[in-house]
């Protein structure tokens, strides 16, 4: 079926500052997931998925435990999601997801990144209609058995692919919990390579020449913003 997606493995994590950014990002997400859905990972699949990803990204256990404890105590910051959309170098489409306790600060920081890259920050809905908001699972398995398990559980499946023994499942973001339950129910505890919700571009925007270098700098600037959690784009170098 050949659908490409952006597997956002953070290319940072090489310096202490970069690791701190990764830890902070996971800390916020785990805190909010536990606060909104409960602190028990067995009853909160979003939290469980986050914890699994954090461990894969070598986030120390004390960072995870501290975030859950903070949610358990009901204290701490009250972050709210903020999403910004626009056009990056070469006209590519960009979505920036944030968790913030100060929206004015966050939009100012994100706007600065866009301005420095001579990019254009748009309004809500500017480019998001050109992305699918999808839950994505990647694991060792077989396409036919995976599809059967999902359909038997009445999951709204967007796509299933298999390549080199790896199965990739796409479902609407609203089907995340249902799909994860169906997969683990059918195949037991899976070691997911990818288990998350992403914005998947419906197409790509080719960029070349100077735009590639500017795009890399633009992404670095956005990733350095404290409140930025994830950046999605459709640029194809």
Image (spheres, helix red, strand yellow):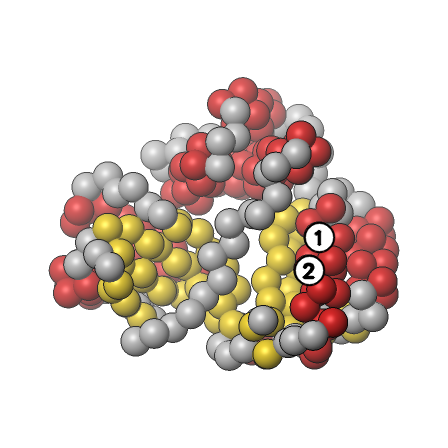
Check disc 2 and report the residue beneath it: 216
Q: Secondary structure at mark 2?
A: helix
Q: Secondary structure at mark 1?
A: helix
Residue 11 in view, yes or no: yes
Residue 85 in view, yes or no: no
Vertical relation: 92 (above or below) 223: below
Vertical relation: 178 (above or below) 213: above
Residue shown at 54%/77% (left/top)? 204
Query: How many residues crowd mark 1 within 10 Å: few (<14), some (14–19), many (20+)?
Result: some
Residue 169 picture quarter? bottom left
Residue 163, image x and y in percent? 26, 63
Residue shown at 66%/37% (left/top)? 18
Q: Are dots 2 and 1 in contact, CB under 8 Å?
A: yes
Q: Looking at the figure, which quarter contains the C terminus?
A: bottom right
Residue shown at 79%/71% (left/top)? 119
Question: In 3D space, how far apart are the residues under numbered discs 2 and 1 (Cα atoms)?
Answer: 6 Å
Residue 167, image x and y in percent? 26, 59
Query: How many residues crowd mark 2 within 10 Å: few (<14), some (14–19), many (20+)?
Result: few
Q: Looking at the figure, which quarter contains the N terminus?
A: bottom left
Residue 205, image x and y in percent? 59, 79
Q: For this view, does 211 lie left or right of residue 201?
A: right
Residue shown at 29%/41% (left/top)? 191
Residue 188 picture quarter? top left
Check disc 1 and report the residue beneath it: 220
């Amino acid at each position: 079926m050949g659908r490409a997606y952006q597997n956002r493995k953070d290319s940072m994590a090489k310096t202490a500052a970069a690791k701190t950014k990764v830890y902070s990002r996971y800390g916020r997400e785990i805190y909010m997931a536990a606060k909104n859905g409960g602190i028990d990972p067995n009853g909160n699949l979003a939290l469980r998925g986050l914890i699994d990803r954090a461990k894969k990204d070598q986030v120390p256990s004390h960072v995870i435990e501290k975030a859950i404890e903070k949610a358990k105590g009901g204290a701490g910051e009250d972050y709210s999601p903020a999403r910004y959309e626009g056009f990056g170098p070469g006209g590519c489409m960009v979505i920036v997801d944030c968790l913030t306790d100060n929206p004015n600060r966050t939009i100012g920081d994100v706007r600065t990144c866009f301005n420095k890259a001579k990019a254009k920050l748009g309004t809500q809905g500017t480019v998001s209609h050109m992305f699918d908001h999808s839950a994505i699972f990647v694991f060792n398995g077989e396409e036919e058995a995976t599809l059967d398990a999902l359909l038997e559980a009445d999951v709204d499946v967007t796509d299933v692919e298999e390549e080199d023994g790896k199965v990739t499942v796409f479902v609407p973001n609203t089907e995340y919990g249902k799909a994860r339950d169906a997969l683990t129910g059918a195949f037991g505890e899976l070691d997911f390579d990818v288990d998350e919700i992403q914005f998947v571009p419906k197409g790509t925007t080719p960029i070349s020449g100077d735009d590639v270098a500017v795009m890399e700098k633009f992404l670095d600037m956005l990733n350095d913003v404290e409140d930025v959690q994830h950046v999605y784009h459709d640029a194809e170098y």
